[in-house]
């Protein structure tokens, strides 16, 4: 498992100036590598994102946002004219993908390739997920409900609009039996890799959105809660895992639940866990992807 060691403190006993910048930069690289490592260990969901080359930065944001949930998204680089070999690679990715995403902007309909990719995906009966920024679904995909990503620009992988929109898509995809188990496994894996109390709490909220879990997954959530001090030190994560144990006593060995109680000590937390990720989101029943 990849680990990031905190740099030695400066002479005054704290990280200062360039030390903070270097550490945070290394932390981001390490987290990206951890996600890539996790994707190779589990069975990722193959995605294909069709987009105009004018929107390549936005496409990258979406790819990064979907990654922690187990969706490995192929991006076709349309800013160069494809050779025959490049067209073959795009065709291969289209045939291999399980979920086809469209990044709907005004530039999308002016691309030489996006409509062709969309037509192939529809013909291959792929799961179709339109992602709308400024353009409604049209043509082959006019009948599909789009997930709206508000705003005309996506600033980066931490853009709240991107994360919320992509999470709504993931929750809906998780309702499909052949995708749900794999999405849950990947979110558990990302929860296990939490690098801060805040991140552990955010993933705990997402895990609650994805309930119920099978017995093996319940056991795994408790086990990773015992291994990662960012989880057993996070009030929100503790609260979630304790509630999960109460609801699934038969799936959690007594020795494991006792270990988690010992790791978390006597922390006082609220009695009811409320998943913040549910706020201001449309229910999954309103979203019908192809």
Image (cartoon, rainbow, N blue to C red):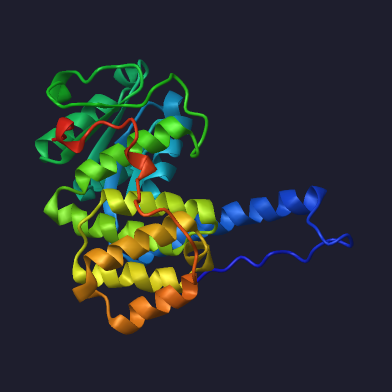
Question: Does 79 sit left or right of 109 as displayed?
Answer: right
**Percent position (x, y) of residue 253?**
27, 81
Residue drawn at (12%, 23%) of the image: 143
Q: Residue furthest bottom?
A: 255
Position of residue 221 relative to residue 131, above or below, is below
Question: Does 280 sit left or right of 125 as displayed?
Answer: right
Residue drawn at (30%, 17%) of the image: 135
- Whether residue 200 is visible, yes or no, is no
Residue drawn at (51%, 51%) of the image: 198
Count of labels in the image: 0
Along the line of sight, the residue nearer the viewer: 5 or 227 = 227
**Percent position (x, y) of residue 247?**
23, 64
Dividing the picture into quadrants, the one containing residue 60 is: top left
Along the line of sight, the residue nearer the viewer: 114 or 99 = 99
Position of residue 116 relative to residue 5, above or below, is above
Along the line of sight, the residue nearer the viewer: 101 or 220 = 220
Q: Residue furthest right?
A: 11
Position of residue 1 relative to residue 111, above or below, is below
Along the line of sight, the residue nearer the viewer: 46 or 191 = 191
Quadrant showing the C terminus: top left
**Percent position (x, y) of residue 205?**
36, 49
- Whether residue 111 is visible, yes or no, is yes
Residue drawn at (57%, 68%) of the image: 3
Dividing the picture into quadrants, the one containing residue 242 is: bottom left
**Percent position (x, y) of residue 213?**
21, 61
């Amino acid at each position: 498992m990849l680990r990031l060691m905190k740099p030695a403190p400066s002479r005054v006993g704290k990280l200062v100036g360039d030390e903070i910048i270097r550490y945070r930069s290394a932390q981001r690289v390490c987290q990206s590598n951890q996600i890539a490592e996790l994707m190779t260990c589990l069975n990722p969901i193959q995605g294909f994102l069709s987009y105009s080359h004018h929107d390549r930065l936005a496409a990258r944001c979406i790819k990064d946002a979907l990654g922690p949930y187990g969706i490995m998204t192929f991006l076709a680089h349309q800013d160069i004219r494809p050779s025959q070999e490049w067209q073959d690679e795009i065709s291969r990715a289209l045939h291999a993908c399980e979920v086809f995403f469209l990044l709907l902007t005004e530039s999308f309909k002016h691309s030489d390739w996006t409509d062709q990719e969309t037509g192939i995906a529809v013909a291959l009966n792929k799961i179709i997920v339109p992602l709308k920024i400024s353009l409604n679904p049209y043509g082959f995909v006019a009948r599909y409900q789009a997930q709206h990503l508000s705003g005309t620009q996506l600033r980066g992988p931490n853009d709240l609009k991107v994360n919320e929109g992509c999470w709504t898509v993931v929750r809906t995809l998780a309702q499909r039996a052949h995708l749900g188990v794999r999405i849950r496994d990947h979110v558990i894996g990302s929860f296990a890799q939490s690098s801060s109390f805040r991140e552990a709490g955010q993933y705990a909220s997402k895990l609650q959105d994805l309930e119920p879990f099978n017995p093996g997954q319940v056991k795994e959530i408790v086990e990773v809660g015992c291994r990662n001090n960012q989880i057993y030190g996070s009030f929100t994560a503790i609260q979630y895992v304790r509630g999960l144990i109460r609801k699934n006593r038969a799936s959690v060995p007594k020795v494991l639940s006792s270990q988690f109680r010992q790791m978390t000590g006597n922390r006082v937390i609220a009695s009811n866990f409320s998943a913040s990720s549910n706020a201001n989101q449309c229910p999954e029943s309103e979203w019908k992807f192809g």
